[in-house]
Image: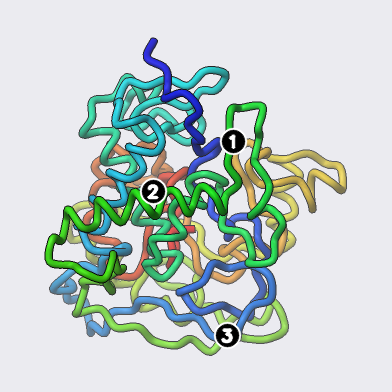
Amino acid sequence: MTPAPSGCDRGIYPVRCVASDGPVSAKLLALALPITGSLALFLGIPLLFAGGDTEPAAACAAGGTSSDVDAIAATIRDRESGGDYQARADGSTASGAYQFTDATWAGYGGYPHAWLAPPEVQDAKATEHITGILAANGDDASAVPVVWYLGYLPAPDDPAWDTIPSPDAGNRLTPRQYQTAWLDTYATHADEADPAATDGPEIAPSTAAECATVTLDAPSDGPGDVSLTTVEAITVNTQIAPQVQQLVQAARRSGYQLAGTGYRSTQRQIELRRQNCGSSRYATYEMPSSQCTPPTARPGNSLHELGLAIDFSCNGVLIRNRSSACYQWLADHAAAYGLHPLASEAWHWSYNGQ
């Protein structure tokens, strides 16, 4: 067994962003910030102005340019494993170059553990996570190390910034310290990717020039006031309905029959919590979503309650496998319609990948 580097502070639960557990109200925050705490009145969602059934000319990037992602991936490999694709952590299921836990790896590519997968498969998994974090945080690379290490992005005044997470697992740095060290390494890789840069790395805006950002007027009195529209038998927030309709129609033209569950009432979210997390008050309303099987957001915290997420099935079967033809089609096309996958659930797609 090849151990991870001694003293390596690694993500104990990579890429479970705060939006899964942080409070979500019908007042939505600008896309440049994670959904947590007190929320602002508006949300920027990538929407494509395309009429009829025409397919978009270009896809929207999920976050960051390819060179950004390459530099970020190289930084994670350096920090997590020293670039060893067969590294295995002591006292944890974390393995591979990016130190994915088995729970987060989730059998990706048909491999039970990350370290068993070839480098190109591990890189593909990491790219999914990285682009999801960038998309959820306004292409801010400084959010990546914190989410990767801690599992979410704390609020600025959260004491978690200066608390070592799970020191018994071998972590020795606080998220703030880890972020600082990570950014030093990232600066080196970013300079290598762009030798002409002289002022340090900058996060470039989305490269999808054809994609416009619009401001959604969100209701102010809770999820029950969200305006809903049913398109192609999927009920979603009215303001993303045209894009969802175009996506389903484009999939149909390619031979894939997409269906799904979009909007979910808070009462239904409570029922799912009791089913997946337990019937006690703590389990239903307070327990972290990651402790449920499968992970299930707390009532009032799910994007389904705002009609901004969809659980897709394809040809009558829930999309569970990222190697399936349906998932691959979505991975290639859904971003053009403003939808991105949740890293831990192949069937769950939303405006920000949360």
Q: In which quarter of the image is the N terminus?
A: top left
Q: Depth check: 280 or 128 in front?
A: 128
Kindly report the distance in space between the C-alpha atoms of the residues bearing marks 1 and 2.
24 Å
Residue 98 coordinates in the image, percent (x, y): 37, 35
Which element is circle 2 on? Answer: helix
Distance Cα–Cα, label 2 vs label 3: 28 Å
Element type at marker 3?
loop
Q: What residue is shown at x 57% (from left), y 82% (from top)?
A: 227
Where, by quadrant of the figure, is residue 4 drawn? top left
Q: Nearer the viewer, mark 1 or mark 2?
A: 1
Residue 172 marker? 1
Residue bearing the label numbered 2: 129
- The tag earlier along the polypeptide, 3 or 1, is 1
Question: In the current view of this chain or complex, which residue is farthest to the top?
Answer: 1
Residue located at (31% from left, 68% from top): 203
Q: Is residue 252 at all visible to an observer of this figure?
A: no
